[in-house]
Amino acid sequence: MKIRSGFVSLAVIATAFTGTVVASGTASASSGGGCDTQSISGESIKGCVSASGAYLEPDGYVLQNAHCSSVDVSLVDDTTGNVVLTTTYSCALGHKGPIAYRGTNGHTYHTMMDLVPTAGGYWVTSLSPNEVFND
């Protein structure tokens, strides 16, 4: 009886452990993301990336625009090496985007924001931290 009792207890523990492992393996969410600020001689931008449900949301901010011609916000799929989305904005100070993009599970993305200068200005590029996408 004691051997059988011990066997049942071990089986219950093993089942509980396996159930816990399976349950924790089923949930997934995107991780990482955030913003990066870059500034050079009167030009300053902040490129950001985040995820919401099934979508990535690249966006950014123009913080200073002394010699700005335009601003490009691009989403880069680091897994494939491709730029998957680019939108061009005016140089007005403030928020640009976000732009919703349906991500691919398991892929890593980042936002590349470029301030394109006028004559006498500096090209400024901000690369956001990476976002590993899972919805």
Image (cartoon, rainbow, N blue to C red):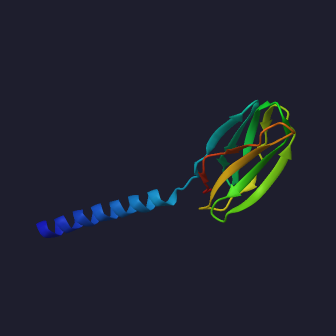
Answer whether residue 68 is visible to the viewer in this image: yes
Question: Is residue 121 shown left or right of residue 25?
Answer: right
Answer whether residue 57 is visible to the viewer in this image: no
Q: Residue at x 74, y 31 (%)?
A: 41
Q: Residue at x 40, y 60 (%)?
A: 21
Q: Residue at x 61, y 56 (%)?
A: 133
Is 10 placed above or below 133 here?
below
- x and y percentages locating residue 87 in the rendered image: 83, 50
Is 24 placed above or below 66 here?
below
Residue 109 falls in which quadrant of the image? bottom right
| Quadrant housing the C terminus | bottom right
| Quadrant housing the N terminus | bottom left
Residue 79 falls in which quadrant of the image? bottom right
- x and y percentages locating residue 62 in the rendered image: 77, 34
Q: Residue furthest left?
A: 2
4, 59: nearer the viewer: 59
- x and y percentages locating residue 18 in the rendered image: 36, 64
Question: Is residue 19 shown left or right of residue 61?
Answer: left
How many numbered discs sit on the rendered protein? 0
102, 46: nearer the viewer: 46
Q: Residue furthest front?
A: 120
Is 70 placed above or below 100 here?
above
- x and y percentages locating residue 48 in the rendered image: 68, 43
Question: Is residue 28 shown left or right of residue 43?
Answer: left
